[in-house]
Image (spheres, rainbow, N blue to C red):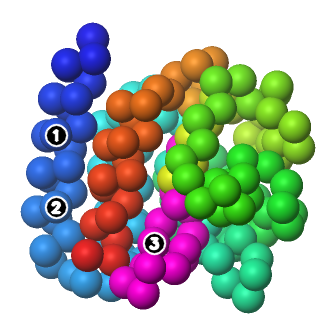
Amino acid sequence: MQNSKIRKYTRIYAQIEKLLRQCSEPLARMATINAVLYHKMTSFSWVGFYLLTDNQLIVGPYQGPLACQVLEKNKGVCWAGINEQKVIIVPDVHAFPGHIACDSRSRSEIVIPVWNKNGEIAGIMDVDSRSKDNFDTIDGAELERICKLVYA
């Protein structure tokens, strides 16, 4: 199972890397990443980016159900990822203190910080699943690798 997941991410990474050669604009890259992940990873119910703008997390490109436009400051999984500056894996969102439920069907979540070319956090990639315990360290490492392509 683990090896097949790694192989799938390897194929997806190669596809995304090839597609991103067409444009260096970060928003276009985010949109492309979202589309590929949303359609290739069947357990992902929402894939998107929240951008850190004027000390707020504002929704950027995404795929899936409607998103919260602005996330309440220092609350929820996305802000935890920003504040702790690391990948956060939440096996059960209902057990996470201060979870922000933009989609009540979401059961697990992973967030990955996105760093700009200056080494500053520009935002966060947020991925939801309707299954509990959907994400693991392989997802964390592979999605982190994909996020590095946004500003490459």
Q: Earlier in the sequence, mark 1 or mark 3?
A: 1
Name above or below for residue 133 compared with residue 146. above
Q: Earlier in the sequence, mark 1 or mark 2?
A: 1
Instruction: Identify the residue at image location x=28%, y=17%.
Output: 2
Asked whether, in this view, residue 130 is left or right of residue 62, the answer is right
**Where are the magenta residues, as a range?**
113-127
123 in magenta? yes
Say whether residue 46 is visible. Answer: no
Q: Which residue is mark 2?
A: 17
Q: Earlier in the sequence, mark 3 or mark 2?
A: 2
Mark nearer the viewer, 3 or 2: 3
Whole-percent x and y of residue 30?
40, 67
From the image, give the main secondary structure of the stretch colored magenta. Answer: strand
Disc 3 marks a residue whose amino acid type is Trp
Mark 3 element type: strand
Figure quadrant of residue 51? bottom right
Name above or below for residue 92 compared with residue 41. above
Quarter of the picture holding the C terminus? bottom left
Mark 1 element type: helix
Q: Which residue is mark 1?
A: 10
